[in-house]
Amino acid sequence: MDFQALYAHLQAQGAAGLGGCDEPRAKDPEDKQDKGRAGDPFVLVAVEQLPAFLQLCRDDEALGFEVLIDLSAVDPAAEDEDLWLVIQLLSLRHRHRLMIKSMVPKATPCAPTVAPVYRAAQWHERECAEMFGITFEGHSDPRHILLPEDWVGYPLRKDYVFPKEYRGVSCE
Amino acid sequence: MNNGNIFLDLLVRFAPEGTPSWLLDLSAAGVGVGILVAMVSVIAMFCVWMERKVAGHIQCRYGPMYVGGWHGWAQSIADGVKLLLKEDMIPIGADRPLFVLAPALVLGSIFAALAALPLAPGVFFADIDLGLFFILAMSSMTTIGVVMAGWASASKWTVYGAMREAAQVVAYEIPLGISLMVPLIVAGTFNLNEASALQSGWYGMHWYIFQNPFVLPAFALFFISALAETKRAPFDLPEAESELVAGFMTEYSGIRWSFFFMEEYAAMFLMSVVAAVFFLGGFESPFTSLARDVFGEQHFLASLTAGLVLLVKAFGGIFLMMWLRWTLPRVRIDQVMTMGYKYLTPLALLCVLGASIFEALWLGVA
Amino acid sequence: MLDVKTQDLEVNMGPQHPATHGVMRVLVRTDGELVTGAQPHLGYLHRAAEKIGENVEWLQYLPYTDRYDYLAAMNNNLGYSLAVEALMDIEIPRRAQMIRVICAELNRIASHLVAYGTYGLDIGAFTPFLYAFREREWILMLFEKICGARLTYSYIRIGGVFNDAPPGWLDEIGHFCDVFEDKWREYVDLLMMNKIFVERTAKVGVISKEMALDFGLTGPMLRGSGVDFDLRRDCPYMIYDEIWQAGAYEIPVGTGEQGVLGDSWDRFYVRVQEMLESLKIVRWCLANIEEGPTIGELPKTLKVPAGEAYVGIENPRGELGHYVVSDGGKVAVRCRVRGPSFVNLAVLEDLLPNTLLADTVAIIGSTDIVVGETDR
């Protein structure tokens, strides 16, 4: 299925939390500010509904997304109010992909864990949590994974300030 | 040579009149030990060089090529000097006395075992009636040293290595001993000199493996058990470098580590000589019998030929062990145990039974 | 009876241990030789590649891609280039695509040779390692001729490849292909079909199909479990679809012929077979390559249109995904790297308990991780 068909199917199934989609478009020649949008389309999903949405994606025969390929976040800009939680799904049966985006407000960076649906998400969520400071509620193993346990700050946030020293070792 | 020690004979011949006999005995022992240590060290060093050359050529490379000029012959000497000069390190948590004692015990027991080996017909350090028994007992002693080293190092990896060594040696002593019983049944003696001498005849091809059809399978069993006993691949579990870092010798360095290394090669030599004596004709070969015919039974050159033949056979065995090491992967501990207890031991017992029946029928003993 | 108190032994396998293939640590809980629990600890090689991606220009980031899976740098270059190209409107010349495929597949062979050799080492066979490195050396020499580097190539660029192949280079690859095919049989006989090797790896570390999907495994780990899926065929990028249509290669899948489907042997089998398939792809490219330019039209300062794209390619270890977000500037907003080793490693937590210590090594080896990629 291509993206339009996937989106139509998701709508027909009444997928939980489905909040629209975004597709690449050409630059508007009239509007000087408009940059257009290149790349891949994605669907927007309300963050609280993610587990239910992914459950549908996995179990629906026509969607058939067996594999969660990637889960990560994006901090679009320091002044932005939301982080994006981005999930890539892949269906081996139907050979199609789906990009899912959820907005996680920086004020309350919380998301439900999707590891019960896709076990693959567990380590991705750990990485995401330490890099962006998103709390995954219900996560079974909320330790740091790449950073030391005592690391302060969330390095992949745009407002992250590089530390001057770590455990007495100067970083300058 | 009546008192069974050539050094004592020589000393008695050249010592001034009236020297007390205990001094003679002591001096003879000292000379013997000195020669033994020197000989074993040279053999071990040669084996190290040989191993590196064999490994190199198996792996499409040359191995050592520079030190000493010709094919890196002095590499082992250079390594030995380097190891001697290295800092002597003992981990803080280690049990110091045991840590220091372990390599000495390992090397000492293997030297003791080697003392029972014949060098040429009638030339030996110690002519022991229960020679084979003594060798097996002494070579088992090394296990105690290894376990000691593993425990004293106060490291988890070394404990694993030590436990594996203990389990493995216990499992393989049994088939090793039983498979050696087969040629013993044919030979009827534990003495290595006599066992070798009994194989003369048939133009030097009257070897035990040809005397009784059950000796050949027993030889295969013995060889496999000997590999496990000497911790050689595919049974190198106690040091399993990809699993246990370096097993029981992880914490050792410098000259103490080289003791373990020397022990490994000395043990290989020991097992190869035992195999040669009890299965592959010992000193006997067509060359030996030819040399005897040409030079006469007691001639120096006949003895030299016999000694060389044994050496060649021993190094043939060592080469086979090296060949296997650089070809085969390592087996797992449960597979080692299964193989030892479930297959080798019953097969060895079968060989003993078969050899006994064959021997009884052949010799007409009833 | 003596009252002996026993307890489990906790051993740190790593960070410096020969079996962890780099600086990774597995905290192993053992009862004698039996492993009762295992906990991988990563991060010793974390170099903040994703953060660097947000601070350097698009083209400047390319050398950093070399460094996550340093055994397959060409594939990393390719993955990143494709992701950036997905945002740009750019035509990749056909010759550049051919050379990209040749380099990526040769690099796959080189990477699988390391996997082959080091897995032999893990199991205790030393010699296959040197045989594998003999051929790998040849591939590295070929790469050196085309781009001057042996490990970190930065050769496949956004828009094409850095330069054209030097004269005679393609013929040399043809020669390599002929020789390699003979050597490949040696590998199979020497290690893969060795009785002890089979005993050590068959029925060890079995990953069922369901488990593989749940953990998101990709690449040989997935195919070893009997799932017939390869991004080159099923989500084709560049000219792989054309090569597949031409029938030039097949996708090897684990069969469970030596033990259980999805065991360590199957994963190893898939890797070894893939070397031969990669060779076929290289041969097809050599037969069909034409003269032409090797890099597309690029502006002096590379500005990538605003948008976001995810591109996953078949790396030797699985799906290497690049998720790039651009706001139209010279620098990426986000440069997410989905390393296959990172995902494949997660399976250890479930796979290691109730195996023997030696199996632990065999299982870690069969996941064929590159720590540079797990930690990035």
Image: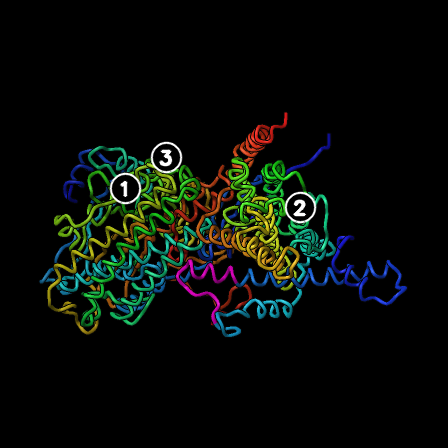
Q: Which mark is residue C253?
A: 1
Q: Nearer the viewer, mark 1 or mark 2?
A: 2
Asked if residue A149 can be seen in this view, the reply is no
Q: Return the chain for callout 1.
A: C
Identify the residue at image location x=21%, y=50%.
C232
Three-letter amino acid code of the residue under disc 1: Val
Left or right: B142, with C116 as reference point? right
Measure how far apart labels 2 and 3 are at the Cα level: 54 Å
Residue wearing tag 2 = B194
Question: Percent from the top left, x then y, of residue B239?
Answer: 56, 51
Q: Is residue B144 above or below residue C304?
A: above
Identify the residue at image location x=54%, y=51%.
B285
| SS under mark 1 | loop
Question: Percent from the top left, x then y, of residue A149?
Answer: 50, 54
Three-letter amino acid code of the residue under disc 3: Val
Quadrant the N terminus of chain B occupies = bottom right
Measure how far apart labels 1 and 2 are at the Cα level: 61 Å
- Asked which quadrant contains residue B362, the reply is top right
Q: Is residue B360 above or below residue B81?
A: above
The magenta stretch spans residue B60: yes
Measure how far apart labels 1 and 3 are at the Cα level: 13 Å
Q: Return the chain for callout 2.
A: B
Left or right: B313, with C99 as reference point? right
Crowd band around label 3 with a 10 angstrom C-alpha radius: few (<14), some (14–19), many (20+): many
Are both tags, 1 and 2, on one chain? no
Crowd band around label 1 with a 10 angstrom C-alpha radius: few (<14), some (14–19), many (20+): many
Residue wearing tag 3 = C260
Tell me which segment is drawn in magenta: B50-65
